Image (cartoon, rainbow, N blue to C red):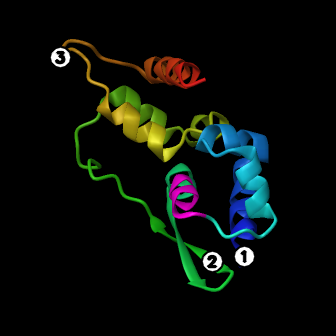
Amino acid sequence: MKFWELISKEMEYWGLNRNKLSKLARISRSTLLKLKNCEEPTSLNREALESFFGKKILKLNENNYEWGEKLNDKNDNEEITQGLKDLLDDEKTMRMMFITEAEVKWMKTIRFRPNQKPTKQDYIDLLFIYRNIGE
């Protein structure tokens, strides 16, 4: 399937339009429009989309792509807090907030004092602040 068809099917699954994808994946709207018009993606844009969707994009041959394996976080075995586990297990919240793999990686790097027990809501609040700082 063509590159944009692959991306647009995933966008449809997650309920995204080009504007939302542009903002969340940090790819310009004009770049997404070029991809829609069958322009070949740069390696940087391809990596950004892979990171956002959490899956490898495989190029089978000219204009033929498919999703590959899920991208693994090197620190998947690392101890994470119960609050983050609760958030990651809540598929509805993950989809509604369009939480990306990159943001999950960032949340895994947050360190709390030993006596702190961050909740799912704490991570949601931190993510809101993180997203607003980037604007």
The image shows residue 97 at horizontal and vertical percentages of: 62, 33
Is residue 43 highlighted in magenta?
A: yes
Q: Along the line of sight, which residue is nearer the eye, 93 or 8?
A: 8
Q: Main secondary structure of the magenta part?
A: helix
Which residue does the numbered mark 3 point to in the structure image?
Answer: 114
The residue carrying pointer 3 sits among few (fewer than 14), some (14 to 19) or many (20 or more) residues within 10 Å by Cα, namely: few
- Of helix, strand and loop, which one carries label 2? strand
Horizontally, residue 4 falls left or right of residue 114, namely right
Q: Residue at x 56, y 79 (%)?
A: 59
- Of helix, strand and loop, which one carries label 1? loop
Q: Residue at x 49, y 23 (%)?
A: 130
- Write down the quadrant of residue 42 in the picture: bottom right
Query: What amino acid is labelled 1 in the image?
Result: Lys
Q: Which residues are magenta?
A: 42-48
- Give the label on residue 41, or none: none
Which residue does the numbered mark 1 point to in the structure image?
Answer: 2
